[in-house]
Amino acid sequence: MTHFLPRLIAGATRTLSTDLGCTGCVALAVFLASCSTIPPARDEGGLVEGLPRYSLVFIIHGDGDYLYHDTLGNARTADKEVLSKAQAIAERNPDTEVFIFHEIERGHVLFLFPRHDGRAYYYRNGRLLAQKSYWRDQGESRFEPEVRLYEQFTGVQSRPPLRLFFYFGHELPEFNGAGYDASYAKRRVTIHDLAAGVRGIASASGKIDLLVLATCFGGTPYTIGALAPYARYIVASPDNLHLSYFDLEPLESLDVGSDDAEVADFADRFARHAFERLASEVQTAVSVVVYDVNDVGAFLESVADVYDRTLAAANGMSPVSVEHCDCADDSTYALPGMSEGLTILYRAPRFGRMKNEQSHSGWECWRIAD
C-alpha cells in the first residue's frame, strides 16, 4: 500500500488537467494514506537483543483544549509538547520499551472521510518499531483500544522488571463524566475507565511500579482508591495542575532498580523535580504528592463510605453547588494518620484567599459550596 500510494497520487496529478475525474483519485489516495499504518523504522543490526530493563506507557489525552501560553507569551499545545518529550525519552533509553498513545480530536480528510482519532507508537531499544493510527471508539470500555494495541505490540514476551505508567490530561471525573472527550459529546468518562485500562495493561504481570497521574485534582481518596489495586506508588496532584504538566526530565536517562526502596526513591525524585519546575513557573498553588499504596489503604478504607455518599449527593447537584477542598478542612476526613504513606510537596498560591495556607494534607475532597 505504501509503495502504491505515491504512484496513485503522482499518476492522478499528471492527468489532472485532462481528466477531472482523477480529482477523486487524489482524494482517495490521501484518505488511504491517512488511514494506513506507517511501516516500522527498523534497524535490525542496531537493535539490542534481550529483555529491556524498563517498560514505559504514556497515554496522552489531546481531545480537548490544551492550549496555554508560556512565560514569554508563546502559544503552546500541552499534549503535543508531552508527545514530543515522550518520543525523545523513547529514543534516549536504549534498554527500554515505550508505548505512546496520543488521543486526538476526531476530524475529516477533505471534509468527507473520517480520520482516525488515536495514534500509537511502540519503541524498543531506542528504535521506533511500530506506528499506527486507530479508532478510539472501538471497544466496550474507554481504554480498550489502547490495551488491545499494547498487547499487540508487546506480544507474549515477559515484562521488564520495572514498569512505569503515565496519564496526561484534564481532571478525570469521579462522577457524571459527560463531555470529557470533545469528539464524543454523549460518551461519559470517569476515573474508573482509566482504572480499567491500567488493569488491562498491568494484566497478570503484577502491579505497575509507578503510576503518574498528570491531571488536576488527582489526589482524592476516591481516585487513588480506584488506581491503588494496580500500582505500588502513585504520583498525583490533589489540587490544580498547570497545563505544562509534570516535567519528564528524570526519565531521560533511566537508572533505577526494581526493589521497593529504589522505586520509592525514584518516585520521590520525580515528584520533587516536577514540583520545583512548576513552582518556578506558575503563580497558582503547586501540589505534588507521592502515595505509597501499601500505607494509604487504612485511610482509604476508613473514608470510603462517606466519600461515596458525598459523590452520590454531588452527582445530583449543579456543578456550581459543589467544590474541591483540602480533606483536612472537613472533620469527617481529618483523621489521625491521614497523611501516613504520603510525601507532600506544597506551595500556596501567590495571590487570593488561599495564599496564607502553608500546608496541605495531601488529599482533596468535595464539599457543598457556600
Image: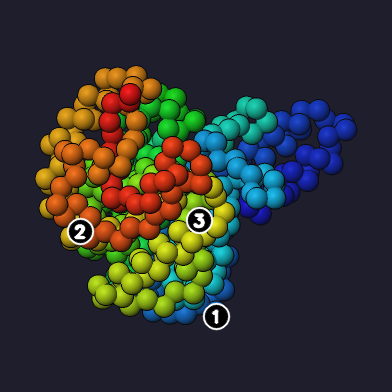
Is 286 situated left or right of 42 in this image? left
Please state which of residues 141 and 256 is positioned toward the viewer in this rendering: 256
Q: What's under tag 2, amino acid-wise?
A: Glu
Look at 16% across and 38% down and name the residue there: 332
Q: Which residue is mark 3?
A: 279
Residue 218 sits above or below residue 313 on the image: below
Along the polypeptide, which appears first: circle 3 or circle 1? 1
Three-letter code, disc 3: Ala
Residue 79: where, in percent of width, then height? 54, 47
Residue 7, label in figure: none
Could you tell me residue 272's position as x and y percent? 42, 64
The residue beneath circle 2 is: 340
Q: Residues within 10 Å of mark 3 (few under 14, many from 20)?
A: some
* Mark 2 vs mark 3, CA separation in Å: 24 Å
Q: Does residue 301 appear left or right of residue 165 in this picture?
A: left
- Residue 204 visible somewhere in the drawing: no
Please state the horizontal and vertical placement of residue 322, each as a whole percent of the image. Answer: 32, 26
The C terminus: image quadrant: top left
Location of residue 230 (image quadrant) = bottom left
Residue 13, position in %: x, y?
81, 40
Which badge, 1 or 2, is on the more N-terminal residue?
Answer: 1
- Badge 2 local density, few (<14 within 10 Å), some, or many (20+)? some
Number of residues whose C-alpha sits closer than 10 Å to that of mark 1, classed few (under 14), some (14–19) or many (20 or more): few
Residue 45 circle label: 1
Q: Nearer the viewer, residue 325 or 107?
A: 325
Q: Is residue 233 above or below residue 143?
A: below
SS for dot 3: helix
- At horizontal 48% and vertical 38% (from top left) the residue drawn is 352
- Alpha carbon of mark 3 to alpha carbon of mark 1: how far? 45 Å
